[in-house]
Each structure stands twice: as C-alpha cells, then as structure tokens.
C-alpha cells in the first residue's frame, strides 16, 4: 500500500483541519498514513523567529484566523480561537509519540486539535492533556510520566531534526516515499495523489 | 453580475497560475473580475523585509519553486525559473494600469507572466516590456513614455495603498464586494464561490 508521512505540529492552526480530514481521505484513496509529530519552534528559531509568523506579521495573522474559520465552517468542524497562540506543544507531541506507537495515537492527535482549536483550550497545560488522556480511557498519570521521561525526549528531538532534513519549514507537511514535499492543509489531496502515483499499480505514463 | 477584485503583483510567482486561470474560471462562474496590479515591495518593507520571503527563508523558497513547477505541470503551463528573483515589477505594473483602462489589459498581464515565469525573462528590463507591447500590436514607445509619466506613477502608489488598507499582505489576493479576503492561487475557486454567494440570485440560507 502506498504510504504518506503526515508531519504535524500541535501548535499549528492549519494542522487542525488536516488532522481531521486525513483519515477518511487516505482510507478512501488507499494510502497508508504515518503520523509524525514534530516541533516547528526550533525550525522557526533558526529562521530568526521567536514566535509564530502569524504573530510577527499581524495582517497575515488576521487573515489566517479568518481563513481557518471559513475552512472549519465548510468542513463543519467546531472552531474557537484560543486566547493564547501559539501554544506550547511539547507535552502533546511527546504524548503523541507514545500513543502512536500504540493504537490510540490518531485519536489522541485529533482530540488535542479539537481541544485547542475546536474548544479554545490551552494544550500547553498538563491538565488539558490529562483530561484528553482520561477521555481516551488511558491512565493519564502513567502516560504523562512516561512522556516526560528521559527516554521520550530524544525521540521528539530526533523527529524534529528529521523534519528539518526533509526540508520541512511549516505544518502540516506531507512527504511521499520518494521525498516529495507538500505543505499545507490545502495540499493534502495533491500529496495523496502523488503517493498513489508511486504505487506499482499506478498506470505508467498516465 | 457579481464582481471579484484580483490583486496581482508581477513579481509574484503564484500570481502566474492565478492570472492564467482566472479568466476561464470567472467566465464559467459568471463573475466579473477586476484586475488590480499593485506592488508588494512597500508592504514587505513595512514588515521589515527587503526582498521576497522566498529568498529570506531558503527552505520555503526551494519548496515554492518546486510547488510552482508542479502546479504549472498540472495546468500544462510553460515554466522556467528566472535567473533573477524577485524582479522589478514597477514598469510592468504601470503599463498594466494603462492597459487595463483600455481593452488589452488582461492580455498584457498574461503576457508579462508568460515572459517571466514561462520563459524565464526579466520583466524589469524595459526591452522585455517593449517586446510584449509590440506583440500585442501596441506602440511600445508611446505606452512606455506614458507609463513613466508623472500622471501614471501616483495611480500605482494609490493602488498599493488601497491593497494595504484591504489587509492584503501577499499575492495573488482576491477581495469580494463585501471585503472578504482570499490569499493565494489555491483560494481562487473559494473566492469565486464567495463572490457568487453575494449575488441577489444566490439562494438564501443555502
């Protein structure tokens, strides 16, 4: 089955609709998606940014929030602009790495985005993550402890370094098996199509 | 007929496919498009940028060129990355303002983009613009003189100031009659749909 890597950052607004759409779209396309949480912060820092470009450039930020509201409206996704943006996504990403190695990773990722941009909650707070974990039937205390252990931290750093190596500079990003990079929720369909075109079953020369 | 303002910058890469697509799409949607050339330079400068963000942020720039190549491939548009980027678009924009007040404006705009991103020419050079004008059956000398006259310069400055007032921060941008802003070639269809929804003929509550 063709595969597609879905690079997501929990502080990223456009990763929200992408996370909510990708499961259904990939299933119907017959593409196997690997969810790859990473941190944009270190990548932004190396570009000289200490916060989101949506904060650094107010006209761009105003546009983004309106655009996201329109996108959520069209998808019938709940939308609430959080008071704090961008949020600290380190804990959510560490928990996601644990969850994705088990079978509740995608549900956890979707629940984080729904809390943050659907309900306007602060996912940088440990209690928000604990409530999400409990809602998924997980032992919040045990998971949080493991997420913040010395064993988990290097995994997220390595994932972020790999994102940078792939040329990723924003989220969501999608990377096909041949290294083709697609950036943005609005490129998800193109990325799936590219992934499919690499399948041995795809017609040659079409 | 519903209207849509198409804000274009001749130095902008993604304005190229938008300029090539918008005529056919708008005609079949029944939307009247007003082409509004402006300059991004002064807007970028007020954000602290002295060149394109695609040059300031190399990973983003590499991605953009590859993305544009893919988009042109899908649309079967010729594509050639110009040696110089971004190009000086002031003369092209001034000529476009004259042309759009007559009946050869859209042809001129498309020819400029085709020269720049389809053939890799430098539209900042007066000879490039002169060749385009001649190809359109215009008196190149007379048009260039008028474009650089004191009568034309304030028109482009006013247009650019209006773009800023509308919240425009990039190109292409599309603005509907009710002030809704859409940014990017990939939002053209959404913008046309929004423009149509404002028509008295559009179903209420649909």
Image (cartoon, coloured by chain):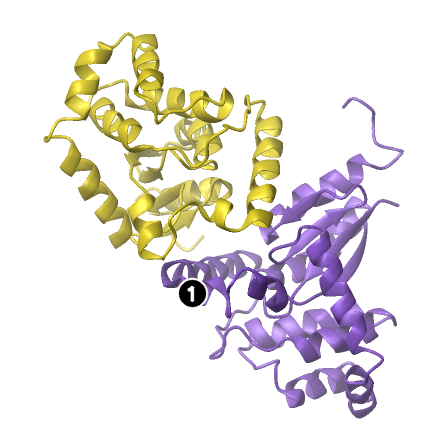
Chain colours: A yellow, B purple
Q: Residue at x 44, y 67 (%)?
A: B55
Using the image, determine if residue B203 lies above or below residue A143: below
Q: Please, which chain is the residue tagged with disc 1 on? A: B
Q: With respect to residue B29, does A86 lie above or below?
A: above
Decide which of A60, A75 is in the foreground and name it. A60
Q: Is residue B43 left or right of residue B59?
A: right
Residue at 41 percent of width and 46 percent of height: A51
Q: Position of residue A87 (x, y in %)?
A: 39, 33
Q: Eyeballing the image, is A147 above or below A49?
A: above
Q: Quadrant of residue A103?
A: top left
Q: Is residue B37 visible?
A: no
Q: Is residue B201 visible?
A: yes
What percent of the width, then of the height, locates residue A49? 39, 52
Please name the residue that numbered disc 1 is placed on: B56
Other residues around mark 1 within 10 Å, as few (<14) / some (14–19) / many (≥20): few
Residue furthest to the left in view is A151
Q: Residue at x 79, y 92 (%)?
A: B141
Which element is circle 1 on? helix
Among the 4 quarters of the image, the one containing residue A174: top left
Left/right placement of residue A177 relative to residue A12 reads left
Q: Is residue B143 left or right of residue A162?
A: right
Q: Is B140 placed left or right of B13 in the picture? A: right
Q: Nearer the viewer, residue B60 or A46?
A: A46
- x and y percent of residue B61 in the render? 42, 63
Place of residue A4 in the rendered image (x, y in percent of width and height, measured from the top left): 33, 39
Q: Quadrant of the N terminus of chain A?
A: top left
């Amino acid at each position: 089955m063709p595969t597609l890597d879905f690079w997501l950052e929990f502080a990223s607004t456009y990763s929200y609709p992408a996370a909510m759409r990708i499961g259904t779209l990939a299933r119907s396309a017959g593409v196997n998606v690997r969810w790859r949480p990473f941190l944009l912060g270190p990548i932004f820092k190396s570009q000289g940014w200490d916060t989101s470009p949506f904060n650094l450039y107010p006209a761009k930020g105003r546009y983004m929030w309106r655009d996201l509201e329109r996108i959520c409206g069209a998808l019938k996704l709940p939308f609430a602009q959080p008071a704090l943006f961008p949020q600290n996504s380190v804990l959510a990403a560490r928990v996601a790495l644990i969850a994705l190695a088990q079978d509740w990773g995608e549900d956890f990722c979707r629940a984080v985005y729904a809390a943050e941009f659907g309900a306007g909650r602060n996912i940088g707070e440990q209690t928000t993550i604990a409530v999400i974990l409990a809602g998924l039937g997980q032992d919040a205390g045990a998971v949080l402890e493991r997420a913040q252990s010395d064993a988990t931290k290097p995994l997220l750093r390595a994932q972020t370094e790999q994102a940078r190596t792939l040329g990723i500079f924003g989220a969501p990003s999608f990377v096909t098996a041949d290294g083709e990079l697609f950036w943005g929720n609005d490129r998800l369909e193109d990325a799936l199509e590219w992934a499919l075109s690499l399948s041995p079953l795809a017609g040659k020369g079409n």
